[in-house]
Amino acid sequence: MTVKPLNILISKNLSVSELTKLIGATGNLRSQLKQDAAQTTLANRGNKVFYRGLIEFSNICTKDCYYCGIRKSNSNVERYILAEETVMDAALFAHKNHYGSIVLQSGERSDSYFIEFINRILAGIKKETDNKLGITLSLGEQSPEVYKDWFSNGAHRYLLRIETTNQLLYKTIHPNDETHSFGKRIACLENLKATGYQTGTGVMIGLPGQTMEDLANDLLFFKLFDVDMVGMGPYIEHELTPLYEAKDHLWPLQRRFDVALNMIATLRLLMPDINIAAATALQSIDPMGREKALQWGANIIMPNITPTQHRKNYLLYQNKPCTEEGADDCSSCLKLRIEMAGKEVGFDEWGDSEHFFKRSLTFKK
Ligand code: SAM
Ligand code: SF4
């Protein structure tokens, strides 16, 4: 089917109602959206997809987010932290398999043991790979000093999702205390940018009570905050979390999936040169979910390289994919699946956000 371009690229000042229409698009409008996003990705980020080998090195968390399966109050979780050598081995696996970059992710902690643990790992990876492996961190809210420390030890990208930009909704999905405040999260994002990180954020899609206007505002926030990277995906319930109570008021999974793809495509049109990740949660709804996202504007994929025996303990939500597989299984099938989606893998490349470099140039002027 040939579809007429939407031409919305040129009107970057889309209103909430225009964005809402795109996020909820169906039928012909949806086909147009997909086609425009694919063309925009190709023109601005090329045909390559970049790997970020995901190492979920610890599920120990001091926070209690109502949606998350590894929240501290879930006593059914067997807690773990990988030994430094095991994290190093996983990082070296990524390097040897030409992944280009890794993401170190865990529950949130800010004790000095944890901070130094990360510092040693960063320094070790940089040394062992001769500074060739790019490192993204996803370790939650930390002080400006800690962000600086980790940056100077070699991390250069940081992911901290805002989760939702509707502050009332944010309050309903988090405990009402200082540790879980929206203001603190914004301040952390500002500190990350000021430190010099390529800064990434994102939201969950299909949260109980979330509206299409909320999602449109989320996209406008990404644009206004001038982020370098976005990772967003469907919210998926976990029965051992407080938010599970709202399970009968959620959009059907397929709708969350479709809206997530529409969000990715619309964001690609709004911010053509950023990096957009194909979130793992998409894969738990549709086995080809991440590959589909690559055809809707995403250009980053995060193969899970956590040692298999620990994956079952990092269950953020139900049906989390690839919990039984090893890193080798995942990496060999993934390349093929990406090629089937008409893309190529940018092996041995960092695949940094183009937007970051443009933003930094403007900043320096
Ligand atoms: N603790 C760090 C943090 O919160 O930024 C990093 C790890 S946390 C598990 C990473 C992301 O998982 C969160 O930002 C959240 O969006 C996502 N997540 C947690 N529970 C989820 C759920 N039930 N469905 C979808 N995504 C979820
Ligand atoms: Fe902890 Fe992150 Fe889960 Fe919140 S989302 S409970 S901070 S791991």
Image (tube, rainbow, N blue to C red):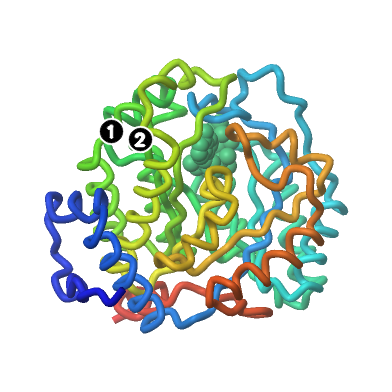
In the picture of the structure, the residue carrying the numbered disc 2 is: 182
At label 1, counting other C-alpha atoms closer than 10 Å, the crowd grade (few under 14, some 14-19, many 20 or more) is: few
Disc 1 from disc 2: Cα separation = 7 Å
Q: Are marks 1 and 2 in contact (CB under 8 Å)?
A: yes
The type of residue carrying mark 2 is: Phe
Q: Is mark 2 within 8 Å of ligand 2?
A: no
Where's residue 7, x and y in %?
18, 75
x, y percentage for residue 309? 84, 41
Q: Nearer the viewer, residue 66 or 253?
A: 253
Q: Quadrant of the C terminus?
A: bottom left
- Give coordinates of residue 193: x percent, y percent: 41, 60
Q: Is residue 365 above or below residue 37?
A: below
As drawn, is 295 to the left or to the right of 208? right
Q: Which residue is mark 1?
A: 167
Instruction: Using the rendered view, name the quadrant where residue 10 is placed.
Output: bottom left
Going by the numbered disc 1, the residue's amino acid type is: Gln
Q: Is residue 14 left or right of residue 111?
A: left
Q: Residue placed at 50% from the left, 53% from the top?
A: 159
Is 355 drawn above or below residue 24 in the view shown? below
Q: Secondary structure at mark 2?
A: helix
User: In the image, what residue occupies the spot 54% across and 77% down?
Assistant: 343
Question: Who comes first in sequence, dot 1 or dot 2?
Answer: 1
The mark total stands at 2
Residue 179 seen in this snapshot:
yes
Residue at figure coordinates x 50%, y 34% from the top left = 236
Task: Name the quadrant containing residue 319.
Answer: top right
Residue placed most toward the observer, 289 or 274: 289
Callout 2: 10 Å neighbours few (<14), some, many (20+)?
many
Give x and y (percent) for residue 189. 40, 51
The circle drawn on residue 147 is none
Callout 1: helix, strand or loop?
helix
